[in-house]
Image: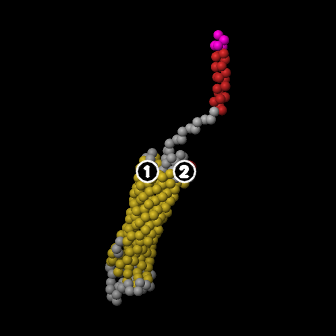
Amino acid sequence: MRTLILVGAAALSLSAIAPALAADMPLKAAPVAAPVAPWQGFFFGGSLGGDWEDPGLWTFGDGRTVQLPSASSWVAGLHTGFNWQFGHLVLGTETNYRFTDLSSSSACPGTAGQNRLGGLICQQRIQNIFTFGGRAGFAYSDWLLYGTGGYASTAMETNTFNATTGLFNDGAGHWHNGWFGGAGLEYLLTPDIVLGVQYTHINVNNHTETVAPVNLVEDRNISAKIDMVEARVSFKLWSGMWGPFSK
């Protein structure tokens, strides 16, 4: 009987002090929630790659034409944008400004002494490309496969040079408007660093370049198509403001 009384007393004592002991014990950290939208948020970055131009047919005021050969060069760009993620679907917008040095030359139509185009070299040059458009893709874990397209504009120059001396004869330049389309693949290296590769096709409209009448060389109507492949790196900004966007 005495033993039962002692056991009961001990049990009552433990029940009394148990809440206090539990309060003093360290709490186990709650499990971290799985990422809800790892691709969502602002981003900015840069790209580096190569591009190829297919110059359009030059048409002069009197109807003569010249087809310049294709050209290739390096291309480097800066981009910024925003992505929204809805499950596996990722939608976004992106602005991109690229620098390049595409240059193509050919003999202007005509013969020296026969007309005012004779004895000249015709050159088409592109150094700046601007694009703005949308993105739509499918995300699976750390990978994103997407398509992109929208508005494009290129700063295009047309110059002529003396075929014998190489001296500059005349030139004109204008921004040519058009469209672009492409596709890319991105990998989420860290919660805030994205690596990728992208192919882009750009098609800009015909535009007549008006040349100052220094040597009475005629105006010319030109266009261009550009293809490029770039390696990209992007950095996400302020992801914490938009929820648990990290792995």
The stretch drawn in magenta includes residue 151:
no
Spot occupied by residue 153 in the image (x, y as percentages of width and height): 44, 67
Q: Which of marks 1 and 2 is nearer the N terminus?
A: 1
Seen at 40% across and 62% down, the residue is 229
Closer to the camera in the image, 171 or 188? 188
Tell me: residue 172, above or below residue 242: below
**Helix, strand or loop for the magenta stretch, by majority:** helix
Secondary structure state at the residue bearing disc 2: helix
Amino acid type assigned to the residue bearing label 2 in the image: Ser
The span picked out in magenta is 1-5
Q: x, y percentage for residue 57? A: 34, 73
Circle 1 Cα neighbour tier, 10 Å, few/some/many (<14 / 14–19 / ≥20) = some
Q: Quadrant of residue 16?
A: top right
Above-or-below relation of 46 to 91: below
In this view of the protein, which residue sits in the foreground, 59 or 158?
158
Residue 231 sits in quarter: bottom left
Local SS, label 1: strand
| Residue depicted at 35% across the width and 85% down the height | 118
Checking the image for residue 96, the label placed there is none
User: Residue beneath label 2, please?
Assistant: 239
Tell me where residue 146 appears, x and y as whole percent.
Answer: 41, 54
Quarter of the image containing the N terminus?
top right
**113 relative to 75 in the view: left or right:** left
Q: Residue furthest front?
A: 3
Q: Which residue type carries mark 1?
A: Trp
Residue plotted at (54% across, 51% down): 239
Colour mode?
secondary structure
Q: Name the residue under label 1.
A: 143
Q: Residues within 10 Å of mark 2 (few under 14, many from 20)?
A: some
